Image (tube, rainbow, N blue to C red):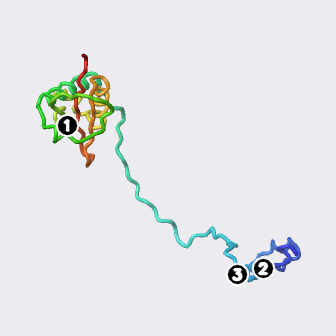
């Protein structure tokens, strides 16, 4: 016995008739009461969906231009000034050392570097400076100058240390 005859539908054309369709649906529901089968999905909404207010986000019309070479030079001078101040080895956060490395006496802090950069940059570059651009310049310097970036446990800042060349 197929499903249609089990539901009491003898002719498929009877399904076209709306009145008989509702009766058949009730019969079909009584057959499938124990199942979790969905027989009909409504496409009519009782009320209109809630509309979200339009938020206008002002975006820049053109990209900011920053001289990375000059920014790296300024970052380098600020980091070198900070590295001249000796620091206690116990105050430096512990980090995994890939091999025996010796470091310069001082450390620099990225937050301090970022705070002091506007003092040495031009007015146009001050406006374009952001933490991500400053980090980009420090990452380039870390590669060029053999710097180690040491994260702190709270991840609010990181220390910058200079690796000394061991030429024997």
Q: Position of residue 21 (x, y in %)?
A: 77, 76
Q: Please name which of the two marks, 1 or 2, marks the residue nearer to the observer.
A: 1
Task: Kindly indicate the quadrant of the structure image that contains residue 68.
Answer: top left
Provide the residue designation for mark 2: 24
Residue drawn at 22 percent across, 37 percent down: 159
* Mark 1 Cα shell of 10 Å, populated few (<14), some (14-19), many (≥20): some
Residue drawn at 81 percent across, 78 percent down: 7
Q: Position of residue 26 (x, y in %)?
A: 73, 82
Residue 109 is tagged as 1
Q: Please name which of the two marks, 3 or 2, marks the residue nearer to the observer.
A: 3
Left or right: 22 with respect to 2?
left
Left or right: 13 with respect to 151?
right
**Mark 1 or 3 closer to N-term?**
3
Marks 3 and 2 in Cβ contact (< 8 Å): no
Quick check: 44 above or below 127? below
Instruction: State the separation of the CA atoms marked 1 and 3.
Output: 69 Å
Provide the residue designation for mark 3: 33
């Amino acid at each position: 016995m197929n499903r249609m005859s089990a539901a009491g539908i003898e002719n498929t054309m009877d399904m076209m008739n709306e009145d008989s369709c509702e009766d058949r649906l009730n019969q079909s529901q009584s057959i499938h009461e124990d199942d979790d089968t969905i027989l009909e999905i409504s496409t009519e909404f009782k009320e209109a969906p809630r509309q979200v207010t339009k938020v206008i986000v002002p975006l820049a019309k053109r990209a900011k231009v920053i001289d990375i070479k000059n920014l790296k030079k300024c970052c380098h001078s600020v980091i070198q000034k900070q590295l001249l101040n000796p620091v206690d080895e116990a105050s430096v956060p512990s980090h995994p050392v890939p091999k025996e490395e010796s470091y310069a006496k001082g450390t620099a802090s990225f937050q301090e570097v970022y705070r002091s950069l506007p003092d040495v940059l031009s007015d146009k570059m001050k406006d374009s400076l952001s933490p991500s651009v400053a980090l980009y310049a420090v990452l380039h310097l870390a590669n060029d100058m053999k710097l180690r970036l040491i994260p702190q446990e709270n991840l609010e800042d990181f220390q910058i240390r200079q690796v000394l060349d061991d030429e024997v």
